[in-house]
Image (tube, rainbow, N blue to C red):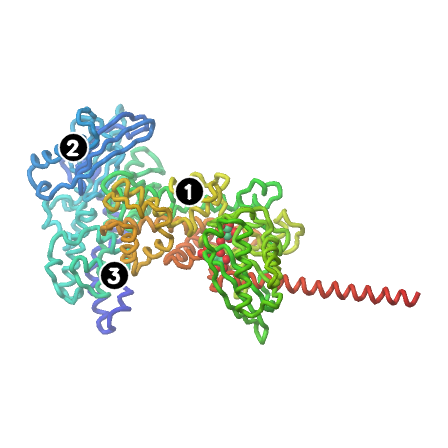
């Protein structure tokens, strides 16, 4: 028995487990190819390529010359008509090349099945009709445009008729699979693009040892039995059918659907390859709902088995393509006489772009089987899966895939920025302000007292009463209330804002019955503040949604004191102003003494950490450490992130209340992520790639798609139904494909966020490690913020990326369960103790002084 379906064990009664696992496993075993088998496929592909070149068309792999002698070099100009036939649809495009830019207009025409399978004449009549319609639509009926025809079927060419614009597509799995590459043809012409028609590998029987009975069935039922054997193992048109054959077999064997073979299951073509992508992307419940849509009523265990089958079939396909690709790139490397080859492979095709794991498995296999080649797969932005292509283009722009090279660069960049912000001379021009906080240590367990904590700047304005007592062990008791901060107040005058805060505080004290007491107050103020001591904070700039007038440049403690005094109905002693990151670090530090970093991933984002005092030029002293508020949201404000910012990031920035500021924050934090997704969806809808091109007023409304919607859609369990609900509220009627595309957009955006935050956090961890001079860092990071807490996958992705970026570190991520209020109270407790003890000290000194004056007077 090969590789086990271990998780089946959880769902099946114990007595049935062994036989069920065994039988499903047995069935899927032939799909699991060993490294040796893949090496053999690579070798056969290579032999096939060579044979095809020698025999000029009579071997299994045809290696057809295309008479294209170069790839585009950016000098092309003018208007061209491009016709694309061979995928699921026929596409007519008008491409206008202008100074290295290409504008593309296109229309998609479905080809009815009867025409697709009818006579050639009918097919070409239909196409001519479509082209005429398209030219009409473009208002260019009488223009004589050169036309390129992408005809995705094998054809023998003797010369090129027209200028083809489709030579960028090097590799495609639309419904089929194929590869072309630049081959050395003769000494003078040097290179010509060869259309391999690699789908024919195995037509001479060379793949018989890996072909399963299910593949044989699919081949027999196809319109070209015995041909395109490699294609039938790997491409979109057949994978769904292979899965259906396996499911049929398992059902007949009583292992699925309670042994009930339905008519649906017997219907060829019912299980499309796109379902494979969806099933592998989603979890049990969604798999069940897809099966239900297909008229297959499955149990929970059935869903698991179906997902397993899909995984086995798609994995094999990706591995086989990887083996084939390894043969092609190795050949190119040898042609060029190189020991090592760096090469870019353009890829197109719905399977590659829509399937959640195909591209990764393909890349991994190619890398293993062609170790001397460094292959970058570049998804084409045009082509049949254009919606998916746009997403991959965005993903590429957003570096959302684990482009560890880029993340490492960002991490290093961030480290340099940290150092720049700490230096006295470099700080004024640094993007990271590295603000000293005057917090010197995390809680040591001796804090006690009765405190008020104000918490302003996150999604909620909260007031807390924190009682820290010391009976046997330190215990904390908290009561809190959330108050509204209406838009007109946070955008009004500073005086109104602080009057409002003072009013809420009065209300809270009233309710707590403490209006007559003067309790020490800790003020969590989640904005960048310049501090020279603990109880003073000059607001540098508003961020996020806040923009109250007359506060920037002012000491917020003074403003609040003024508002409290003006009321005159209670008194308060504001002892400390802390950033929310500091509050979070202190809250977590209360439970874990190792905590030395605090980060927020919520409406905004930021981090603080304990820096050696000797490295903080802006504060006197060399001994010990001080917490520094990095204000990393401003990373990139000096232009450092320009090459990774996308058109969507720029649009977000333009429409924000603080253009040009907090550029990192705008790429990653909760206030902006939903909007990023909305902007991408609008672009996709404009290009006709989602929602049948319909753009509703809701979709066009800023803020209508919120970050919490991303979290809901990315939930594996109810993601699908949530997506339906959310999209319906946006006024669109989504198709199954739309769900998949929208969920991919969400993943791209949230993945990028987690990766970028991971890179910055890794920069801080590297710095801590360097400061401590240890080979392995053991530390705890305190975290808070709605995005981190609510998104189903965010935390896991972040942790994974951080551990990958700083492998020699043991990081514990500790969620701050009680917000930063508790931490602010801890800081206040220390401040209170110091002030209180110094007050006692001063009054002691004064009494000593008084005693000696009297003594002096009396004696002398
Ligand atoms: C914590 C703090 C807030 C902080 C918030 C960030 O719980 O108590 O002061 O601003 O997290 O999260 P949010 O998602 O609300 O912006
Ligand atoms: C602010 C930080 C704050 C962060 C998280 C940012 O916009 O500049 O001071 O820590 O949001 O709330």
Q: Is residue 357 visible?
A: no
Confirm if mark 1 falls within 8 A of ligand 2: no
- Residue 131 got which mark? 2
Quadrant location, the C terminus? bottom right
Vertical comparison of 51 with 479: above or below? above
Judging by the rendered image, the residue that carries numbered circle 3 is: 2
Quick one: 843 or 442, which is closer to the camera? 843
Count neighbours of disc 3 (C-alpha within 10 A) and say few if under 14, some if 14 to 19, many if 20 or more. Answer: few
Question: Is ligand 1 closer than 8 angstroms to the Cβ of mark 3?
Answer: no
> From the viewer's perspective, is residue 262 above or below residue 83?
below
Q: Secondary structure at mark 1?
A: loop
Of circles 2 and 1, which is in front?
Answer: 1
Q: Is residue 237 left or right of residue 636?
A: left
What secondary structure is found at the residue carrying circle 3? loop
Q: Name the secondary structure under disc 2.
A: helix
Q: Nearer the viewer, residue 242 or 467?
A: 467
Q: Report which residue position mark 1 lands on.
A: 655
User: Residue 708 appears at what percent x and percent y?
Assistant: 37, 55
Marks 3/1 in contact by CB < 8 Å: the verdict is no
Residue located farthest toward the right when viewing the structure as drawn: 860
Which residue sits at x=21%, y=37%?
A: 107
User: Upstream in the sequence, badge 3 or badge 1?
Assistant: 3
> Rounded to the nearest whole Å, what is the CA distance between mark 3 and mark 1?
56 Å
Q: Choose between 404 and 61: the one closer to the eye.
A: 404
Residue depicted at x 7% and y 36%? 122
Q: Earlier in the sequence, mark 2 or mark 3?
A: 3
């Amino acid at each position: 028995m090969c590789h086990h379906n271990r998780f089946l064990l959880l769902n099946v009664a114990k007595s049935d487990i062994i036989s069920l696992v065994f039988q499903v496993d047995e069935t899927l075993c032939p799909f699991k190819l060993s490294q040796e088998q893949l090496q053999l496929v690579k070798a056969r592909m290579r032999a096939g390529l060579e044979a095809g070149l020698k025999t000029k068309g009579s071997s299994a792999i045809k290696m057809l010359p295309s008479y294209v002698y170069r790839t585009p070099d950016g000098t092309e100009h003018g208007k061209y008509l491009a016709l694309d036939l061979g995928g699921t649809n026929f596409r007519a495009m008008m491409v206008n090349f202008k100074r290295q830019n290409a504008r593309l207009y296109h229309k998609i025409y479905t080809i009815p099945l009867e025409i697709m399978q009818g006579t050639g004449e009918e097919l070409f009549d239909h196409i001519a009709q479509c082209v005429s319609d398209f030219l009409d639509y473009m208002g260019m009926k009488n223009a004589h445009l050169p036309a390129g025809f992408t005809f995705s079927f094998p054809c023998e060419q003797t010369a090129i008729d027209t200028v083809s614009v489709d030579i960028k597509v090097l590799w495609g799995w639309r419904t089929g699979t194929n590869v072309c590459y630049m081959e050395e043809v003769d000494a003078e012409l040097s290179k010509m693009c060869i259309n391999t028609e690699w789908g024919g590998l195995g037509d001479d029987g060379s793949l018989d040892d890996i072909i399963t009975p299910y593949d044989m069935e699919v081949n027999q039922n196809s319109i070209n039995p015995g041909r395109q054997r490699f294609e039938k193992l790997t491409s979109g048109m057949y994978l769904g059918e292979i899965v259906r054959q396996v499911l049929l077999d398992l059902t007949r064997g009583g292992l699925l659907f309670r042994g009930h073979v339905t008519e649906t299951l017997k219907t060829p073509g019912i299980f499309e390859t796109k379902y494979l992508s969806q099933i592998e992307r989603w979890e049990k419940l969604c798999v069940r709902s897809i099966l239900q849509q297909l008229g297959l009523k499955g149990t929970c265990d059935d869903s698991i088995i179906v997902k397993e089958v899909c995984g086995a079939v798609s994995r094999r396909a990706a591995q086989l393509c990887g083996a084939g690709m390894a043969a092609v790139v190795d050949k190119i490397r040898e042609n060029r006489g190189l020991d090592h080859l760096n090469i870019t492979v353009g890829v197109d095709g719905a399977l590659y772009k829509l399937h959640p794991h195909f591209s990764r498995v393909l890349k991994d296999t190619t890398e293993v089987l062609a170790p001397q080649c460094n292959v970058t797969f570049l998804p084409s932005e045009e082509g049949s899966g254009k919606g998916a292509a746009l997403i991959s283009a965005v993903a590429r722009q957003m570096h959302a895939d684990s482009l560890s090279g880029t993340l490492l660069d960002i991490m290093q960049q961030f480290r340099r920025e940290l150092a720049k912000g700490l230096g006295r001379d470099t700080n004024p021009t640094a993007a990271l302000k590295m603000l000293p906080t005057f917090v010197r240590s995390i809680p040591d367990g001796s804090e006690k007292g009765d405190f008020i904590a104000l918490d302003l700047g996150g999604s909620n304005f909260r007031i807390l009463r924190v009682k820290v007592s010391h009976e046997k062990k330190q215990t904390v008791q908290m009561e809190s209330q959330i108050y509204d901060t209406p838009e007109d107040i946070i955008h009004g005058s500073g005086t109104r804002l602080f009057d409002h805060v003072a009013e809420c505080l009065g209300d809270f004290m009233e309710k707590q019955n403490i209006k007559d007491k003067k309790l020490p107050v800790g003020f969590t103020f989640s904005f960048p503040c310049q501090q020279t001591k603990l109880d003073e904070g000059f607001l540098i700039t508003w961020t996020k949604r806040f923009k109250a007038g007359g506060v920037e440049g002012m000491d917020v403690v003074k403003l609040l004191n003024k508002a409290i005094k003006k009321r005159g109905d209670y008194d308060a002693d504001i002892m400390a102003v802390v950033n929310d990151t500091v509050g979070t670090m202190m809250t977590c530090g209360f439970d874990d003494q190792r905590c030395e970093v605090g980060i927020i991933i919520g409406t905004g984002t930021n981090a603080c950490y304990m820096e050696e005092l000797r490295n903080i030029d802006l504060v006197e002293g060399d001994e010990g450490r001080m917490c520094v508020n990095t204000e990393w949201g401003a990373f990139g404000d000096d232009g450092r992130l320009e090459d990774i910012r996308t058109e969507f990031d720029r649009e977000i920035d333009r429409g924000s209340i603080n253009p040009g500021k907090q550029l990192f924050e705008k790429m990653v934090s909760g206030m902006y992520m939903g909007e990023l997704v909305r902007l991408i969806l609008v672009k996709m809808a404009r290009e006709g790639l989602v929602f049948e091109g319909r753009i509703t007023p809701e979709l066009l409304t800023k803020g209508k798609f919120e970050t919490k919607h991303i979290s809901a859609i990315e939930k594996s369990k109810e993601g699908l139904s949530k997506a339906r609900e959310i999209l319906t509220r946006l006024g669109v009627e989504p198709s199954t494909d739309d769900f998949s595309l929208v969920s991919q957009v969400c993943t791209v955006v949230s993945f990028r966020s987690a990766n970028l935050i991971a890179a910055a956090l890794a920069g801080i961890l590297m710095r801590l490690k360097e400061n401590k001079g240890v080979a392995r860092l053991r530390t705890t990071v305190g975290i808070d913020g709605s995005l981190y807490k609510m998104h189903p996958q965010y935390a896991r992705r972040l942790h994974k990326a951080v551990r990958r970026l700083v492998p020699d570190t043991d990081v514990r991520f500790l969620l701050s369960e009680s917000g930063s209020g508790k931490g602010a109270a801890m800081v206040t407790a220390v401040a209170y103790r110091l002030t209180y003890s110094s007050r006692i000290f001063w009054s002691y000194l004064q009494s000593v002084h008084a005693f000696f004056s009297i003594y002096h007077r009396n004696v002398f």
